[in-house]
Image (spheres, helix red, strand yellow):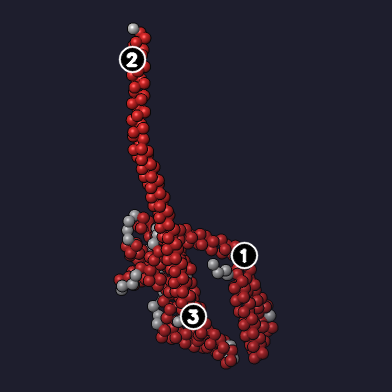
């Protein structure tokens, strides 16, 4: 009984194996076809994914190259504009100098001031010197030099005031842009709330925008009215951003950091050159002090220079040489940055 049961079980197992082998033999071609189809489909999907990745990489490279060409063309245009602006800012007319100094004078007022200065110098020279050639030379020097020196002094002082507040104005623009305000609203905010002379210069930018100029063209005028490297940096950043795009707040934040670093560097240079400036002041004033002390001790010894024509020429030559020496020392001490 047990042997017959074992035979039945063995027969069933062999029948199942034979049926499975027969089914596998009959369905092998279909299974192999499906396996090949799945393999081809996976290869196709992998090839398509690789092709998409390659296209995406190629598109990124092309976009980067396009952006690079755009930035290069923008830089070339800005460089050409910079050369044109530098050509117009090297020899400025008197009207532009008066505007940059913050004076509401016309060319006629400047000429009148020059003439009055020259006549006043001539009158004082006739009273105290008496020599007509010397008086005439002094009147010409003062009439032509004093007004321009005054304008240059006021111009540099106004530019220094502008630099002291310009970095803060850029920070205001950065915070405004990051908070979601448009750039034009940030410029209007500075034009109404910033200290002078930043407020008046940005008011000109806003007025130029209201006249129809773009933001980049309006900001470009800032360098014409305030010919400083910092103002030029600001206009270049906005010009590149308007043409090539990018993160404006990050670019202006970097510019603000550069402006503050330049300001710190200028302070260090001034402190390091203060000793040389003190020495130059002492050397330049020493002849005047010695002449005054000699006049107090022995007046007759010094009056010869004022009573004779030869002495007057010697004084004139000494003043010319002293002025030349002071000018050279000033050029050696002052550093352009």
As drawn, is 92 to the left or to the right of 293? left
Q: CA distance from mark 2 to mark 3?
A: 118 Å
Picture quarter containing residue 57? bottom left
Residue shown at 36% from the left, 24% from the top: 17
Picture quarter containing residue 321? bottom right
Residue 302 x/y as whole percent: 67, 83
As drawn, is 64 to the left or to the right of 182? right
Which of 204 and 97 lies nearest the eye of the viewer?
A: 204
Judged from this view, the residue extending furthest toward the bottom is 132
Residue 209 x/y as whole percent: 32, 70
Q: CA distance from mark 1 to mark 2?
A: 118 Å
Nearer the observer, disc 1 or disc 3?
A: 3
Judged from this view, the residue extending furthest toward the top is 1
Residue bearing mark 2 = 8
Q: Residues within 10 Å of mark 1 (few under 14, many from 20)?
A: few
Q: CA distance from mark 1 to mark 3?
A: 33 Å
Residue bearing mark 1 = 275
């Amino acid at each position: 009984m047990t042997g017959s049961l074992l035979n039945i079980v063995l027969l069933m197992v062999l029948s199942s194996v034979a049926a499975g082998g027969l089914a596998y033999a009959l369905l092998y071609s279909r299974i192999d076809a499906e396996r090949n189809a799945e393999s081809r489909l996976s290869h196709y999907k992998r090839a398509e994914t690789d092709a998409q990745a390659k296209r995406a990489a190629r598109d990124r490279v092309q976009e980067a190259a396009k952006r690079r060409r755009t930035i290069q063309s923008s830089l070339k245009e800005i460089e050409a504009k910079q050369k044109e602006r530098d050509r117009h800012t090297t020899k400025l007319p008197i009207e532009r100098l008066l505007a940059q100094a913050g004076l509401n004078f016309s060319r006629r007022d400047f000429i009148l001031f020059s003439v009055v200065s020259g006549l006043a110098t001539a009158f004082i020279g006739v009273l105290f010197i008496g020599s007509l050639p010397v008086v005439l030379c002094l009147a010409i020097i003062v009439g032509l030099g004093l007004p321009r020196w005054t304008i240059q002094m006021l111009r540099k002082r106004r530019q220094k005031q502008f630099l002291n507040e310009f970095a803060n104005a850029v920070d205001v623009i950065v915070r405004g842009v990051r908070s979601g305000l448009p750039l034009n609203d940030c410029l209007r905010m500075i034009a109404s709330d910033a200290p002078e002379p930043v407020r008046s210069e940005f008011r000109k930018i806003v007025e130029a925008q209201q006249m129809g100029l773009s933001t980049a063209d309006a900001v470009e005028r800032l360098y014409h009215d305030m010919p400083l490297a910092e103002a030029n940096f600001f206009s270049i950043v906005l010009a590149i951003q308007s043409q090539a795009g990018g993160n404006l707040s990050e670019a202006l934040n970097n510019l603000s950091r550069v402006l503050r670093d330049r300001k710190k560097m200028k302070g260090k240079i001034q402190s390091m050159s203060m000793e040389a400036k003190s020495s130059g002041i002492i050397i330049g004033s020493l002849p005047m002090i010695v002449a005054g002390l000699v006049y107090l001790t022995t007046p007759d010894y010094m009056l010869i220079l004022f009573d004779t024509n030869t002495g007057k020429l010697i004084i004139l030559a000494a003043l010319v040489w002293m002025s030349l020496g002071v000018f050279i020392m000033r050029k050696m001490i002052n550093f352009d940055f």
